[in-house]
Image (cartoon, coloured by chain):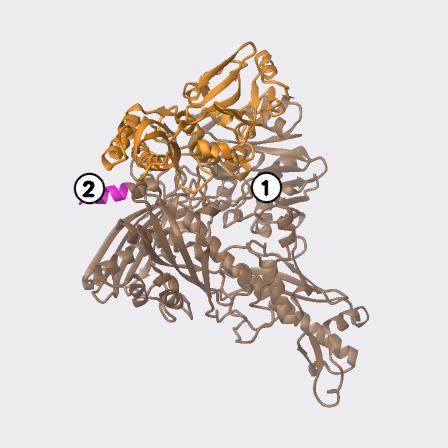
Chain colours: A orange, B brown
Amino acid sequence: MRYATPASAKEAAGLLSKEKGAAFLLAGGTDLLVKLKMGMVEPDLVVDIKRIPKINEIQTSAKGFTIGAAVSGAVIGEHKGLNAAWPGVVEAANLIGSDQIQGRATLAGNLCNASPAADSVPAMIVAGAKAVIVGPNKKRTVPVEKVVEGPGKTCLTKGEVIEAIVLPKPEPRTGDAYMRFIPRTEMDIAVVGVAISLKLERGVVKKAKVALGAVAPTAVVVPAAARALVGSKLDDASLEKLAAACSAACNPIDDKRGTVEYRTRVAGVLAKRAAKLAFQRAGGAL
Amino acid sequence: MGHEQKYVDKKYEVVGTRFNRPDGIDKVTGKARYGADASAPGQLVGRVLRSPHAHAQIVKINTAKAEKLPGVKSIVTSADLPDLTGGDQGLADILENCLARGRALYDGHAIAAVAAVDEQTAAKALKLIEVKYKKLPHVTDVDEAMSESAPVIHDRIFTRGVEPKPSKPSNIAARTQMGYGDVDVGFAEADVIIEKTYKTEQTHQGYIEPHACLASVNPDGSAELWVTTQGHFVFRNVCASLLGLDIAKLKVTSSEIGGGFGGKTHVWGEPVALALSRKANRPVKMVMGRDEVFRGTGPTSSTSIDVKMGAKKDGTITAAVAEMRYQGGAFPGNWAMLACMTAFACYDIKNNKSVGWDVVVNRPKVAAYRAPSAPMAAFAVESTIDLLAKEVGISPIDMRLKNVAREGTQAPYGPTYGPIGIEHTLKAVKDHPHMRAKLKKNQGRGVACGFWFNIGGQTCTDLNISVDGTVNLTLGTVDVGGSRSSMAMIAAEELGIPYDQVRANIADTTSLGHNDMTEGSRGTFSSGMATIFAARDAISVLKQRAAQMWGVPEEDVIWENGQAIATGEGHGNLPALTLQEIAAKSGRTGGPIAGHNEVVADGAGMGFASHICDVEVDPETGRSSIVRYTVVQDAGKAINPDYVEGQFQGGATQGIGWALNEEYIYGDDGCLQNPGFLDYRIPVCSDLPFIDTKILEVPNPLHPYGVRGVGETSIVPPLAAVGNAIANATGVRMTHAPMSPPRVLAAIDAQENAG
């Protein structure tokens, strides 16, 4: 196994694209190291991106935030600007793993691992996050919801590397929230995850976006759920419609973590709770 | 030596106070050496190949390619562990469990093993071993295994305990029945009868330290084994038998142990590591991965239990019947028998009957897990008692007090109880402020009782006094829960010296006579007794030496407060001789001063507990959170209250984990789907409140200090306490543990749909 520490994302892409054997990118390593230890992967080349300048930094501009691919959950959790702008994304990122894992785990890694249950992915989707993807020859920017194509499968082609996650500056009176169901209080994988962002105008929901995790092969955007909220002040009827739309959008599996019936049901329950939290964060009065 | 075993009430100087454990600093600084922390020159890495099938015939194992891999030093299959068990079926089962013999009996069953120069080579070699399997039909559910249509796992099993003896083999290894009275008469007297069926899923002890050992066998038949175990003497005897070694030539050293809970009372990889070392002629270190621990070792039974109980309007229970089906994994056990012994043990029920069915299935060989078999029976019985109490309109505590077992009550398994503490714990619960604390919305409170035996067994202990007066206490019972501290306290108490003058150590198997396992809550009871006797033995030597130093008759010397005092006519004015002064002169008065004791400790007490649990249930998700929990248990005498409380809290925590989320999940293919701590959910710290404890002391009459074992009982009540609390919070009676969110939500839905 060879280990490389390129000085730029482009160099990383070059190394990965040229490798004939099994090549893996290492950012926080919280998925890769587990797979290595379990014997699930046997890399010939590991490309560590943490030495790339600025890849460990969060940059703030008038347009929003650029979160380097190696920025850890702990750093995100302590970033005042991000906490104020996208608390739902921050809480989703901070739910992943333990304190120790938080010191390493990254948003880009959570996205590239492409688990249906990834906590940060639905939250990034509803916040309108985009992935900056660098290939050996070109750079492209792709909405997060288009990155994951199936369990363990992304749109990244051989050699492509996510360099950063870009979050827009939220519009005024926007609020977002992420909630997940786990049987324990922490250190667990989502049985259901719900992310909601909404924008208010005169106390009424003007725009909304709803995404579910762990209920389908990829995170699911649910336009019908968003429609249920738009125009409402989160009255009971609209919340019931939201819950029904979320449950209807579920296409889960029965597995060791939950049944189809349970996931479908709890998706609706959590949607209502997440909507209320996002609504309050947007300045709405319940 | 005729030492007095009977309880004597006295005032203690050291016992009952709180001291730090001697192994504490090493453990908190990471210096302690656990099973995986030993190494030897030239050691190899041992790895095990495990069955991917629930049940399969092993048609052929081809190791040729793996053997050719550079760095591979030995490969073993069952052919390298010939059957030397001489008709001892129990031992033969252990052997077959260590390495499959012709058939893989469960997912994870060890098939072959490799020793290689490093981890990577060993892993590569495992992939090069070719095993041709022919899949066989499997069964993993206890009820299905008992049905006529189930695949029969062993054609040698004909149900024991039924008349006439069955003519066909089945998966039912044994039927056991216990109890007394006439239950039909009892039910006829009852005003209310409740009948319910319960299920509990399989759980693992969940010790954080995986099984690990370092084995080294020499060509002359001598061998050494460093291992994490609850009983190195027993491991020595079993390994020697399986490998055909002389017992005295196999030296076993027990490492520090990172949790056992019964799971480290059984050998798994140790005989295999020894066989690999014997073949390679080099030391072999073998450390299991977590998935191996789950798939290949330990778990407790999954069960299916019917309970029927009847009571009069005044709350008197007139009859009780339990029919309990326990699976023991792929090999027969006596787990249902233990359930029969414990199910109704907290109560005085005139007519009671317990029937147990021990069943085999295609799952790992069941091992002891902290009060094995009792928590499941208690879940069924204690839930049913709450239902009865509700029906007759008496509080759950008063219902239990009305029927509680006392001194003189006949235990369902035969003997008549001496002084026992169950009534005391119930009364303490009734008076506890926890019972009067206000409950919030969606919260409920449950109470449950539990019983577990203590055992005595063989113990051999040395006590050596150094010339500076400090003392080495040499023990052979492995310290699982702080017993070195407790034993040192006992020695200090007897000798009349400070605790920090005594150092307790666990010796290897060449340094002491046989000691039984640390199991059955026996450590402090039996090793404590041997320590008392060894100390008294040393005191008699100290008195004799003092007499010699003074030149007075030995019978004129008494021992008080750590010193010899001459009494009687003529030498009353001699200054007392301290232990240090006598020790300092020992080289000139007859050599080193020591005490020794070997004992089969009889008279182990009974452990009883009552628990209070407050739970909050989210009615929309079915998720239960424990918001308050109190353990009240009779310890007989708490030697070191810190570690007694630790046992209470640890057992309650494991029981809560079992009650809420822990379970083995098998797929239709009979393979375990959650062999890791991510999906086998033991509680994390933030899942639990502080577990409050109250130690009661009802002395065991057959221990000099009144000690009862405290290690296990605390895991018995939680399943039922949580279930009763959920029922109180939601009105829904859970009959299937763990009471995980999907099960609770489904039960809430079913109740709402029923209107």
- The residues tagged by marks 1 and 2 sit, at their Cα atoms, a distance apart of 52 Å
Give the image location of residue B604, x and y in percent.
49, 64
B165 or B136, nearer to the observer:
B136
| Residue A78 horizontal side relative to residue B741, left or right | right
Q: In this view, does B518 lie above or below B697?
A: above
Q: For residue B521, say whether it is visible.
A: no
Query: From this viewpoint, which residue is outermost toward the bottom?
Result: B569
Q: Tell whether position B754 is magenta.
A: yes
Q: Mark 1 points at which residue?
A: B212
Residue B528 in magenta? no
Disc nearer the start of the sequence (1/2): 1
Quarter of the image with the N terminus of chain A is top right
The residue segment tinted magenta is B746-755
Q: Do labels 1 and 2 share a chain?
A: yes
Percent coordinates x, y for residue B663 in the rendering = 40, 41
For the residue marked with disc 1, what is the amino acid? Ala
Q: Depth check: give the residue in front, B518 or A89.
A: A89
Residue holding disc 2? B753
Numbered disc 2: what chain?
B
Q: Looking at the rendering, which quadrant does residue B408 occupy?
A: bottom left
Q: Which residue is outermost to the top?
A: A137
Circle 1 packing at 10 Å, graded few (<14), some (14-19), many (20+), is many
Count of residue discs: 2
Q: Are marks 1 and 2 in contact (CB under 8 Å)?
A: no
Q: Which of marks 1 and 2 is in front?
A: 2
- Residue drawn at (48%, 47%) of the image: B685
Instruction: State the SS at label 2.
Output: helix
What's the residue type where badge 2 is placed? Asn
User: In the picture, which quadrant includes the C terminus of chain A?
Assistant: top left
Q: Where is residue A51 in the image (x, y as percent from the top left)?
A: 63, 24
- Quarter occupied by residue B532: bottom right
